Structures are given as structure tokens and as C-alpha cells.
Image (cartoon, rainbow, N blue to C red):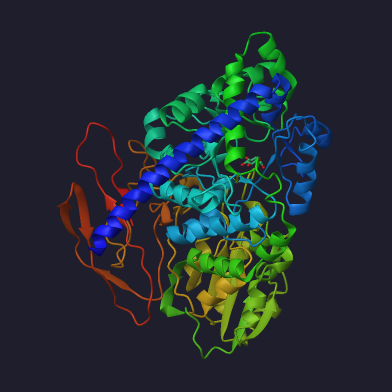
Amino acid sequence: MKKLIAYVCMMFFVLTSAAQSQTDESKMNRFVSGLMKKMTLEEKVGQLNQYAGGFATGPNNTRVSRTEDISKGLVGSLLNVSGAANTRKYQEAAMKSRLRIPLIFGLDVIHGFRTGFPLPLAEAASFDLDAIERGSRCAAKEASAAGLHWTFAPMVDISWDARWGRVMEGAGEDPYYGSLVAKARVRGFQGDDLSKENTILSCIKHFAGYGAPAAGKDYNSVDMSMGQFANFYMPPYKAGAEAGAATFMSAFNDFNNEPATGNSFLLKELLKKQWGFKGFVVSDWGSVGEMMNHRYAKDDKEAAYKAIKAGLDMEMESGCYAKTLVSLVKEGKVPVKLVDDAVRRILELKYKLGLFDDPFRYCDEERERTVIGSKESRKEACYVAERSIVLLKNEGSVLPLSPSIKKVALVGALAKSQEDMCGTWSCAEVSKVVTLYEAMKKKGVTVDYHDGYDLKKNQIVNLEQTLAAARQSDVVVMAMGEQAWESGEMRSKGDISISSEQQRLVSELVKTGKPVVVLMMCGRPVIFNEVRRDAPAILCTWWLGSEAGNAICNVLFGDYNPSGKLPMTFPTDYFDIPSSKNFPMVGETKSGKNFDYTNYEEDIWVGYRYFNTVKQSIVYPFGYGLSYTNFSFSKPKIERKNNKWIANIEVTNTGNVSGKEVVQLYISAPETFIQKPDIELKAF
Ligand code: BGC
């Protein structure tokens, strides 16, 4: 009986909520239509303009007088302004405009807000969708308390090329996994209700193909077959749209010979028509104007014409819409219904955010004080950071550090660098970042710290002193790798090796006979073959945000048993790129057998290694990561139930400590009429 009641109540709830959302929808439509009737063409075009209120993230910054234009109703959104008081100031200007249409404030809230979270690539190494969603949730709570309504995240661009500096901002190389991460992050930012004041709009970027620039050079041309696009690069964008992402951002690059920002196949046909996307598309920074650099438009006017025709709704920064769209409509070159469609999409989201009810609802300084940097945020940041660390090597079980260890020689300036711990493209409060050095001192061991290496001059310093400290300690922990600024936008590198001097320092430390633990700090897969050869233990710790030091120490001292897996292949050398085998977990990875990657593919039908380079082109494949314990797997039992294939596998922890394992299911397609990779990740 109880069950029946529950069922009936549920049905009732479903029916009423569906009816409710229909009413909400028609109420919104009526409101927006009513408002649009009152708008002049100039005011409509005003809604399509987004300017930087604060700092610039790129060139072409159009220096218009923000507040004056806002009060005239000529601006729809500002980016790079945050803070409850600051955003209030601009919103007050908008409230002076004739129709009092509120602004929306956007910012690149990429990995946490004032409380910094791991880089997205690091977070993806957790293979923990709940943790990833929690990361974005926390960022949304903090960002919305600082007056923000919109983040330009998640970046869901698949990339196989670690030379491309922006891999730090994505979820790596796998289309299936990338799609799940995209959904988790959209859910995290937007929650289930945009009208709640602690949720923000998400933005799927960069549509499309930005992660596949030729030779990994940022902004380079993207030229790919439709099969390649559909199978490998498109899925995460589509997943983002399906998850209800409110906005999309067009990419800087050209896509099959046409700039993505003016590409009607991508924006109009695929996104809006085929996928039924109802939100709005914003350009990337200045990318409408950049169509002139592409020689695709001769002037502002032609750029605006091509963008609006292609389905680009809001222009970030280059001001081509602001300067020319009114005349394009008046001259009959652009039908007003195109402008109307873009305006409607923008106003609808402003409505859904609740801004027409109260334009200042996100500008609450009291909430800002209590939410930002709260204990809860710090706890979440540490939780996600621990799960992002990947154990790459642990010969002789050097890790976790034994309780008998009394003295640690901590080497490497990165161990003390608050700024680097935040990682690139960070909003975190640098002074509140817990460094490795600070965290280690709290672990009850004596810490003898030495820089060991000058990151700026790229040379070893005070070698004798550092080695003496190593000799007098029980263990050496060496923080090394890239600096945070070395990955990110415009940080493409031909050679992704860690400098030979830094690597030599590790070899010198190993020669002291003391166990050496290497912490590899990086924003992308890097190459460190000497270190791999010499150091007995290696953890990939990426850039982990405000709680980096605590999370790393928890793993070093065994309070958290590492469970992360690499979301991107680590190649043997930079010339082995791309080396992902879509995706090479073939065979037994736990048996101690060597991998055979001699026959790798970079695509599904081409690609063998170079004949004159090493045979093994991959050192750590996608999905790789060790634990302080061991797991054994039973043979999977496969059965078919309700039209689904179910694979059951028994996982046994055969070691002495508890731990967590990510069980990865790869499948091979039978013979088909389309080409398929050897194996594909389909569940984990
Ligand atoms: C980046 C975008 C970012 C925008 C605004 C551009 O340079 O490519 O991802 O959202 O700047 O800061």
C-alpha cells in the first residue's frame, strides 16, 4: 500500500511540475515578447554587445565608455568584472536605461573561484564525476556570491596534443569520458534551477574543434573529416547541449576553412537546428573582428554580417555588431528577425536568472563575505585535489612515507610557490593558498627546505648544500615540473620536456642513496625520461589550487591512497605526439607485462611510429594510475538484460591498505561498415 501511495504522489508531482514549467515558459515568453515590442533596434543590438568592464583577456579591447553606454541600454553583458559591490555599480547604471534591462556578468571561472580547485585536466584525472560536479558547484556558489551570473566554462575541447597549452583547461583526450565530464560540470554550475541565486550559467566552449589545431599551435587551422569530428571531437559539445548548458562560445579557429565564429554549419545547422539548442552563442574574445584577420571579412560590417547570419548571438569585445548591425538591418541586408532571435535568447536567460525580478539579487555583500573562502569550500577543494593526484611510479613502496620518517629534505621552489599552486587561469586568492612547504610542516616531521633549482635562470643552485641536506634526511621530496604560466592559452610548446637541468638535479639526489619522491607539477603531459628512470617514486600532482599542499601531503603520508588515472597519454618524446591509441589499455595492465605500443595509431586508419625514433612511443597511457594497494580483477561476466549489455566484474583489493580503483571498460566493435578504433572506453 505504501508503495502505491508513493507511486500516485509521484505521478501527481510529475504532472503538476510539467504543467508548472509550461506556465513558467509561457509566462516568460509573454514577458520577453512584451519587452521586445518596446525595444528600439538600437536597444536590441545593445543586448548583443559584451564588453570587458575590468581587465582584458585579449587584444582589440574596444574602449567605449562603459557606464555611459550601459545607461543608454547599449550593452547586454560585461565580462571580467566581479565582486558584489563592483557589479552593483554597473547594474545601477543599467537601471538608469530606458527599459531597465539588467546586465549579465560573465567571467572565466575555470577551476574554482576565490577558493581554487585543481586544473580541469587534473580534476578529470579523478575519474570521479561526483567530485568534478562538486568542484563546479562550489565555484558557482562562490562566483554567484560575487555578483557573477555566468562562467565561460567548461571547456570541452578534446585534444590529443600535449603541445597545445590549453589542454590544462579540458578533460583530456577521450570523447566518451569528455562527454561525461562536460555534463557533470554543466550540472555543477547550473544545478537544476537557474533562478536559484547560487547557480550560474555555464558555457560550452570552444565550438568547435579548438583542441585540434594543426601541430598543437594555439589558434591554428582545424581541418578534419566529418567522420573524425563526429566520432572524436563532437561528442562532448553535444553532451553539454543535452545537459542543458545555457550558452555556447564559438571558437577562435577556422573549422574546415571557415572561421567557427561565422560558420553557419556549426552554429545554425548543427547546434541550433539539429541539437535544438535554445540558449545563446557568444563569440570568443574579439573573434568576430578576427574574421578580418582570417581574410574572411573585409571590414567590421562584413564580419558582423557573417556572424549574425551564421547564428552568433552575442559578440564579445570586438564591437562589430555595435558599430554596424543597426545599419545592416536598416539597409535590408540583415533581416530584423535574426536580431530578434538573438535578443530573445539573451533576454530569456536573463529572465531565468531572475534578474527582471531583482537585478541586484547576486550583489549581496553579506553573502559574499560568508560564502567565499568558507570552510566548506576549502574542504571541497581538498577533497577534489586529493582525488586528482596520479601515482605514476612506486618502486620498493617508497610511498606512502612511513611513520618512522622524522626528517624530510624538501627540494624545489615550486614547493613554496603559492602562485604556481593555483595553476593558470585561476581566480583563487593567492595569499590563501596552502603550499606544500606549509602543509608538510604540520605533518609532524622536520622539514629541511632547499630551492635546489632556479626556475627563472633554469639552473641548479647550491647543489652541495642541497645534497648535504638530502644525506642528512630520511627521504627527499622534490617538487618539480613546469611553472603554472607555462600552460594555458597561447602556451603551446614544441618541446614539452622538463628541462634537463631540473632532471639532472633529481639524478644527483638519487645518487645520495636516499629514497627520492618526485612530485611532477604540470598543466599538461610532460616528458621527463631521466626522472622516470632514476626516481623510485613519482606522483603527478598537476596544479591543485588553494588546498594543493594539504592534498599532496595527505597522499604522501598515506592519509589518502591515490586513485587518479591519467586523462591524457604521456608520450615518450614530443615528436611522438599524437600518441594516444584510442585508447591504449589493451591487454593486461596489472600483470607487470610491458605495454606494446609499437603499433599505435593516432587516428583510426593511419599512423605508425617514426621508423627512426624509440619503439615505445607512450610512457603512460590514458587511464593509467597506480595505488598504494593492488587489485585483482575477475574475468568479466557479460549478460544481456532489457536490451542492455551488462558486464560484471569482481574487484579484489589484494594489498594491505584500503583503496579505490577505477575499473575501465573498453570495447572493440565487431566488423562494421564504418571505421572504428581498436578499443573504445565505454564505461568506468
Ligand atoms: C579565451 C576564452 C575566454 C575569453 C574571455 C579568450 O581568450 O579563448 O576561452 O572565455 O578569452 O576571457
Q: Position of residue 379 (x, y in %)?
A: 57, 70
Q: Is residue 530 left or right of residue 81?
A: left
Residue at image coords 57%, 49%: 495
Q: Nearer the viewer, residue 272 or 671?
A: 272
Q: Nearer the viewer, residue 391 or 57?
A: 57
Q: Is residue 647 above or below residue 604?
A: below
Q: Position of residue 15 (x, y in %)?
A: 36, 44
Residue 175 visible, this orientation? no
Residue located farthest toward the top when viewing the structure as drawn: 331
Q: Quadrant of residue 450?
A: bottom right
Residue at image coords 73%, 31%: 99
Q: Quadrant of the C terminus?
A: bottom left
Q: Nearer the viewer, residue 431 or 149?
A: 149
Q: Position of residue 402 (x, y in %)?
A: 49, 86
Residue at image coords 67%, 77%: 438
Residue at image coords 62%, 48%: 488
